[in-house]
Image (cartoon, rainbow, N blue to C red):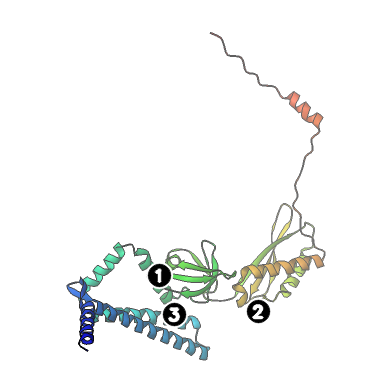
Amino acid sequence: MDEVRHVLDQGWYWANYLTTATLFKINKVEITTLGLLQVVLVLCLAWWVSRLLQRTLIRFGSSHKSISPASLYTLGRLMHYAIIALSIMLGLSMVGLDFTNLAFLAGAIGVGLGFGMQTLVSNFVSGIILLVERSLKVGDFVELASGTAGEVQEINIRSTLITTNDNIDILVPNSEFVSGRMTNWTLRQDDRRLRIPFGVEYGTDKELVKTAGLEAVRAVEHTMEQPGREADVWLVGFGENAVNFELVVWLKAPAVKRPGKVRADYMWALDTALAAHGIELPAPQKEFRLVRAEELAGSNRDTPRRTTAPPEQD
């Protein structure tokens, strides 16, 4: 029994020593292993509480259809950031750090920026701006200056998750949405107008072209049908080989997020309607000039030859 008691005493001594030993100092405050464990425990508890609140908001939104899911998502993200920030301050206060002295906080931020965290801080601040300003919401269909287009799935601390229509997930840094140019197709309204250019041969009855175009519009399910949003066919120019038209149509909300598929559907229906009315699409024309070998040889004889005098000898 004495040996067992001795082993337990030794184990308790080393456990107490390891948990109370000073690892480092911050602003004359000794940071121990037990203090760090307390900070980690507080952060884990705060994370669990944040996830619980976000799930509660999701259930609340499911039972109240009048509330926008994007608004609930924004509220959930802001609550998450606030809870994590408060838990960090609480955990550090438990180990003895005094936040009444803002010089420590400013020094910590300065050290972080000095170690190359400018990009991380910029993306974090940009994410907060996007959530508060609501210029970008979950569910929006956006297009960046680089040509990347897709639906916003998540707005995280560092980046925003966009899913393209090809089901490809792309992580875009938040700073690109704030400092760069972005086209939000669904920011205020979901209905959009689409223009599809096409051409027909000269001499084709333009009224017949308009009839075929409107028939193609009615054959596609994406077309919006309401006053002030009527489809039309515009004559927009006269090209070298064709008369140029545009099929102008207003799209329903679900079709706005699928521009490639929607354009292909209208092109397919337009080709079918033009063929049904006997309207032919213009073929590219090129002019070729044939020259006989005798003419080519004669032109070569008529061309004076250039001669070069031999260099003078010394």
Of pointers 3 and 1, the one earlier in the residue sequence: 3
- What is the secondary structure assignment of the residue under circle 3? helix
Taking the spot 25% from the left edge, 69% from the top edge, the residue there is 106
Determine the CA span between mark 3 and mark 1: 14 Å
Q: Are marks 3 and 1 in contact (CB under 8 Å)?
A: no
Look at mark 2 in the image and give the residue it sits on.
227
**Residue at (73%, 67%) from the top-left corner?**
268
Residue 148 in the image: above or below residue 301: below
- Residue at 25% in and 77% down: 33
The first of marks 2 and 1 along the sequence is: 1
Residue 99 falls in image quadrant: bottom left
Label 3 belongs to which residue? 74
Q: Which mark is residue 126?
A: 1
Relative to residue 104, is residue 45 depicted above or below? below
x and y percentages locating residue 143 in the rendered image: 53, 67
* Amino acid type, label 3: Thr
Instruction: Give whichever of 199, 16 is nearer the camera.
Output: 16
Q: Amino acid at mark 1?
A: Ser
Classify mark 2: helix, strand or loop: loop
Q: Residue 8, how many percent across, how many down? A: 23, 85
Task: Measure the C-alpha gap from mark 2 to mark 1.
Answer: 40 Å
Q: Give x and y (percent) for residue 253.
A: 60, 77
Give the residue at x 52% y 74%.
Answer: 140
Q: Which mark is residue 113?
A: none
| Three-letter amino acid code of the residue under disc 2 | Pro
Near mark 1 (Cα within 10 A), the count class, few <14, some 14-19 or many ≥20, is: many
Q: Circle 1 sits in a helix, a strand or a loop, which is it?
A: helix
- Residue sitting nearer the eye, 27 or 66: 27
